């Protein structure tokens, strides 16, 4: 039985993402790069016609699989050289030009770009699914009244749709950042030992262009022995921002699921257990897991940034950490997306509890509305603030409705009638331009969704 070490191997990360992040898949992409190079060498007359069909059909299985490469690496202490030897041995006399003119990172960096492209495809697809679900909730609850909270204290009224629109746009912007960084991240290189293409004897630009065309990549404009790691660092930063934005939504759901609030809750399936000792527990476990995994994502940013700083035309300090950073970043973000999609699809909303909580402060959260009305009646703004603050504090101390306190005040009655006070205290009448703002957010989200779908060949 295979011994599992990392939770991404068995607990977190979808099977489709695991396949792309596997060592087998990455080595297959390395072989794809080596094959593309050999095909181009054939096109410029350096590889014979009789060999090209054999080269085109080569696979990881043909060369003995990972096991064969790892056995060779025990001697070479060099993974790319082990791969080159395995391919060359399989091709026999047709293997004489394998890796000709290339350096290890021509293969490594270009194959990483291929892996990242496929992994980003999954991330984009799932983020699109999430945003479409969030738009559904926004539209369904655009007018569902609830209290806004700042500093975890009751503030002005909002709607649940307005709240979710804020989260959805933030997540959409995270997707947009990923789309924008693709042009910098999805690049390859075929430029040799220090990036000058010296081994190609003047044909380097043409060879690199043809290889990248076959692989569907753009060549990095200039490189050392490696593609500069600012590109990879940007990717990890953008992925961490997206993970953190999703975690902010998960954190909100966790807080709103507190029994004393209970405005929303994660779905709870039949047979699900919240606690091994407390039978009543219904814990927001997926939202909690999202928040925990997002912490790991943010932790990957530091080594990604450290990898930018390499000696001269390169050293090897980025290599070991990169094998962990890239695969784990995609595996973690994939799980975060899987979880948040499940949470949003199964989210239970309690509008009646939202209304109940809106009334907890007995009207005090509408104090600004009274202050604004007074100011519009000619009371200096600071004076109006002082009057309403004193009356709000009295409402709190005496545990009485703010309306009653206001109507007892001669200062208030001098400017506002009872009907005007009641209207000013009505949360539904103090939502500003919330509908237009929601529509503006949805429009922006849909623009980003269309752009993301176009990169996946969807419409």
Image: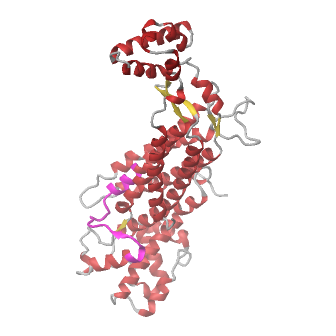
Relative image position of residue 230 (x, y in whole percent): 32, 55
| Image vertical order of residue 277 relative to residue 219, above or below | above
Above/below status of 261 relative to 215: above
Q: 192 left or right of 427?
A: left
168 over 155 or under it: above or below: below
- Can I make out residue 411 in this image? yes
**Magenta span has 257?**
no
Q: Is residue 439 left or right of residue 102?
A: right
Q: Residue at x 49, y 20 (%)?
A: 420
Q: Residue at x 26, y 74 (%)?
A: 197
Count the numbered circles shown: 0
Residue 84: percent from left, percent from top: 43, 75
As displayed, is residue 375 above or below residue 52?
above
Coordinates of residue 198 in the picture (x, y in percent): 24, 75
Region of the chain picked out in magenta, as a range? 213-237
Image coloring type = secondary structure
Tell me if residue 224 is in the magenta stretch: yes
Q: Quadrant of residue 289?
A: top right
User: At x 35% / y 70%, what residue is drawn?
Assistant: 218
């Amino acid at each position: 039985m295979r011994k599992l070490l990392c939770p991404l191997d068995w607990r977190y990360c979808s099977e489709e993402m695991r396949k792309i992040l596997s060592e087998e898949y990455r080595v297959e992409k390395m072989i794809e790069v080596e094959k593309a190079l050999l095909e181009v060498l054939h096109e410029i007359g350096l590889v014979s016609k009789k060999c090209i069909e054999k080269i085109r059909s080569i696979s990881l299985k043909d060369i003995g699989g990972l096991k064969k490469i790892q056995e060779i690496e025990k001697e070479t202490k060099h993974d790319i050289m082990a791969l080159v030897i395995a391919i060359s041995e399989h091709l026999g006399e047709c293997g004489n030009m394998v890796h000709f003119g290339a350096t290890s990172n021509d293969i490594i960096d270009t194959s990483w770009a291929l892996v990242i492209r496929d992994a980003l495809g999954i991330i984009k697809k799932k983020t699109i699914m999430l945003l479409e679900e969030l738009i559904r909730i926004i539209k369904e609850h655009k007018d569902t009244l609830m209290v806004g909270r700042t500093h975890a204290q009751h503030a002005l009224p909002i709607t649940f749709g307005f709240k979710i629109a804020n989260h959805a746009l933030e997540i959409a912007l995270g997707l947009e950042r990923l789309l924008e960084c693709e042009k910098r991240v999805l690049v390859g290189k075929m430029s040799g030992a220090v990036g000058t293409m010296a081994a190609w004897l003047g044909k380097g630009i043409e060879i690199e262009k043809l290889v990248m065309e076959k692989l569907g990549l753009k060549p990095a404009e200039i490189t050392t022995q490696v593609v500069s790691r600012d590109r990879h660092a940007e990717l990890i930063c953008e992925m961490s921002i997206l993970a953190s934005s999703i975690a902010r939504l998960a954190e909100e759901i966790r807080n709103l699921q507190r029994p004393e609030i209970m405005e929303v809750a994660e779905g709870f399936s039949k047979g699900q257990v919240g606690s091994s000792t407390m039978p009543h527990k219904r814990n927001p476990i997926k939202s909690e897991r999202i928040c925990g995994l997002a912490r790991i994502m943010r932790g990957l940013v530091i080594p990604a940034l450290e990898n930018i700083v390499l000696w001269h035309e390169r050293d090897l300090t980025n290599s070991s950490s990169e094998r962990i950073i890239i695969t784990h970043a995609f595996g973690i973000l994939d799980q975060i997306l899987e979880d948040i999609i499940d949470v949003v699809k199964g989210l239970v909303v309690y509008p009646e509890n939202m209304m109940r909580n809106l009334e907890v402060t007995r009207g005090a959260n509408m104090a600004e509305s009274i202050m604004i009305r007074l100011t519009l009646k000619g009371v200096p703004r600071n004076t109006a603030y002082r009057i309403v603050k004193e009356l709000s504090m009295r409402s709190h101390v005496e545990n009485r409705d703010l309306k009653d306190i206001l109507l007892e005040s001669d200062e208030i009655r001098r400017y506002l009638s009872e009907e005007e006070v009641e209207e000013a205290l009505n949360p539904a009448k103090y939502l500003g331009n919330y509908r237009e703002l929601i529509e503006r957010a949805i429009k922006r989200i849909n623009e980003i969704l269309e752009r993301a779908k176009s990169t996946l060949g969807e419409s």
